[in-house]
């Protein structure tokens, strides 16, 4: 699977709080990188669905990696934490 990532990131890199990090310059669509957003992050070594925790004023992006495979979490891509809460219990559906 050669799916384009939303945020280029080294999934093994951590900030001082233990969160993953990258920069907005590594984002395919920087306007989609906001706190609470679920994105596909990674590089040619690996990919994961992540939840953006914070975006600093200097463009540093902090995220947490969701447990499980991309396939398991794919339904969250393009949504936010608030969207996921509303969708809980509604069963699988395609998000646009």
Image (spheres, rainbow, N blue to C red):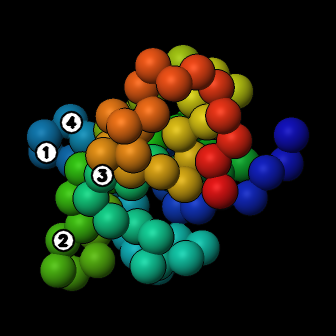
Query: Would residue 4 be found to the left or right of residue 55 on screen?
Result: right
Q: Image point 55% across, 76% down: which residue?
A: 29
Left or right: 13 as drawn, with respect to 76: left
Front residue of this view, candidates 12 and 40: 40
Residue 89 as seen in the image, left or right of residue 52: right
3D distance between C-alphas at marks 4 and 2: 16 Å
Asked whether disc 4 touches disc 1, contact meaning CB atoms under 8 Å apart, the reply is yes
Circles 4 and 2 in contact, beta carbons < 8 Å? no
Mark 1 closeness class: few <14, some 14–19, many ≥20 residues within 10 Å = few
Q: Is residue 62 visible?
A: no
Apparent side of residue 85 relative to residue 47 in the rendered image (left or right): left
The CA span between labels 3 and 2 is: 14 Å
- In the structure shown, which secondary structural element does the residue marked by tag 2 occupy? loop
**Quadrant housing the N terminus:** top right
Which label sits on residue 36?
A: 3
Q: Residue 78, can we see it?
A: yes
Query: Which badge, 3 or 1, is on the more N-terminal residue?
Result: 1
Comes first in the chain, label 3 or label 4: 4
Q: Which residue is mark 4?
A: 18
Image location of residue 82, percent across then percent down: 30, 46
Q: Which badge, 2 or 1, comes first in the chain's sequence?
A: 1
Q: Which residue is mark 2?
A: 56
**Mark 3 residue crowding within 10 angstroms, few (<14) / some (14–19) / many (20+):** some
Mark 4 lies on a secondary structure that is: loop
Question: In terms of image quadrants, where is residue 75?
Answer: top right
Alpha-carbon distance for marks 2 and 1? 14 Å
Q: How many marks?
A: 4
Q: Are marks 3 and 4 in contact (CB under 8 Å)?
A: no
- Per the image, the residue denoted by label 1 is 16
Mark 3 to mark 4: distance in Å?
17 Å
């Amino acid at each position: 699977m050669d799916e384009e990532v939303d945020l280029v990131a080294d999934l093994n890199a951590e900030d001082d709080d233990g969160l993953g990090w990258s920069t907005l310059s590594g984002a395919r669509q920087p306007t989609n990188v906001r706190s609470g957003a679920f994105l596909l992050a990674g590089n040619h070594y690996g990919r994961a669905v992540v939840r953006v925790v914070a975006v600093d004023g200097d463009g540093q992006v902090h995220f947490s990696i969701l447990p499980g495979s991309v396939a398991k979490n794919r339904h969250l891509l393009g949504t936010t934490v608030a969207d996921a809460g509303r969708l809980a219990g509604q069963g699988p559906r395609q998000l646009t």
